[in-house]
Image: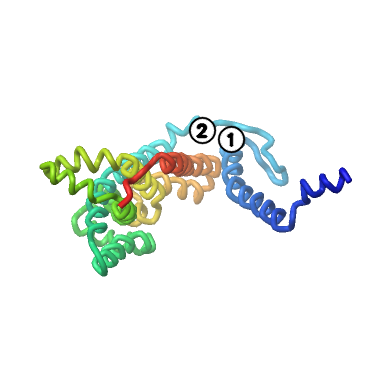
């Protein structure tokens, strides 16, 4: 009797739970496995087939980070991503607000125009931008690469702010205007303080969009702007696997930190409902 009660209280796992458990293990393995392999490879000193693990370990690749090409490339990518995030947010905020005020087919057309540079293949987008930027003398320059990064960043962030302002209570702006607030005062004292959370998220998203750009940087920069994705690709082609592993890990760090920060901010962000 006791055994039957225990079996009733704790039934054996069904096939569905087993399948979900197996799928979870596969997901974790496929997600973390490459990162673990990169981490091991970046500190390996001697790793010969058929050994499963390195027989010697060395931090030489990490110690050489500041003196090798990865250091300047890391600074270049970081600077481009920070500026793209800030400028992209400044441009997309009023654009998203304007899109949210449109109705009917006008809003759909505006949303499609913002989504097009996001959905377009980066190589095709970069080829078109290269022609324009070369004609104004910005091809192969950091400024040209930054402008190219801003195209998908502004498009994505405009859609982000479109969603934000769609949920925003427009009556707050009407009350501010009724009390005599000028457009500048409304932005400074009403909109920007209420949108601190979404603005921080937009800057982080703009940073991530620029951080991982490879095709745009390669096509528009012409190889002269040595950002981190280009440098990692060059190291892989040159057979410098340990240095390439270090660069690949550096590429992964900001997205992981950014996504964790966005997840934390999403729990704390509230937007006034319409």
Picture coordinates of residue 22 (x, y %)? Answer: 69, 53
Q: Secondary structure at mark 2?
A: helix
Of the numbered discs in the image, which one, if any, rests on residue 270?
A: none
Q: Which residue is found at the position 57% from the left and 39% from the top?
A: 39
Picture coordinates of residue 133 (x, y %)? Answer: 23, 57
- Report, in whole angstroms, how far the alpha carbon at label 1 lies from the one at label 2: 8 Å
Picture coordinates of residue 9 (x, y %)? Answer: 77, 46
Q: Residues within 10 Å of mark 2 (few under 14, many from 20)?
A: some
Q: CB of mark 1 within 8 Å of CB of mark 2?
A: yes
Q: Which residue is mark 1?
A: 43
Q: Relative to the observer, which residue lies in front, 153 or 77?
A: 153
Task: Tell which circle, 1 or 2, labels the residue nearer the N-terminal end.
Answer: 1
Q: Which residue is found at the position 24% from the left and 64% from the top?
A: 103
Q: How many marks?
A: 2
Of the numbered discs in the image, which one, if any, rests on residue 62?
A: 2
Q: Relative to the observer, which residue lies in front, 81 or 38?
A: 81
Q: Residues within 10 Å of mark 1 (few under 14, many from 20)?
A: many
Q: Quadrant of residue 262?
A: top left
Q: Relative to the observer, which residue lies in front, 141 or 198?
A: 198
What is the basis of the colouring in this image? rainbow
Residue at the front extreme, as displayed: 1
Residue at the bottom extreme, as displayed: 105
């Amino acid at each position: 009797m006791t055994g039957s009660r225990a079996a009733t209280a704790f039934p054996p796992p069904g096939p569905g739970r087993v399948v979900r458990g197996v799928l979870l293990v596969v997901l974790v393995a496929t997600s973390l496995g490459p990162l673990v392999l990169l981490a091991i490879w970046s500190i390996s000193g001697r790793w010969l087939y058929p050994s499963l693990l390195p027989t010697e370990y060395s931090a030489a690749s990490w110690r050489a980070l500041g003196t090798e090409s990865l250091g300047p490339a890391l600074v270049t990518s970081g600077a481009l991503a920070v500026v793209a995030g800030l400028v992209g947010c400044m441009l997309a905020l009023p654009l998203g607000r304007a899109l949210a005020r449109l109705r009917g087919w006008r809003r759909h057309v505006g949303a499609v125009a913002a989504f097009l540079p996001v959905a377009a293949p980066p190589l095709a987008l970069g080829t078109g931008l290269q022609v324009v930027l070369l004609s104004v003398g910005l091809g192969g320059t950091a400024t040209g690469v930054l402008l190219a990064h801003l195209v998908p960043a502004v498009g994505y962030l405009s859609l982000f702010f479109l969603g934000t302002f769609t949920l925003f209570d427009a009556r707050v702006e009407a009350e501010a205007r009724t009390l005599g607030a000028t457009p500048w005062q409304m932005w400074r004292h009403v909109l920007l303080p209420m949108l601190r959370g979404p603005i921080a998220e937009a800057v982080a998203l703009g940073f991530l969009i620029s951080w991982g750009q490879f095709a745009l940087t390669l096509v528009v920069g012409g190889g002269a702007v040595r950002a981190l994705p280009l440098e990692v690709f060059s190291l892989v082609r040159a057979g410098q696997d340990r240095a390439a592993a270090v660069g690949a890990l550096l590429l992964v760090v900001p997205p992981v930190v950014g996504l964790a920060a966005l997840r934390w901010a999403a729990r704390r962000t509230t937007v006034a409902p319409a």
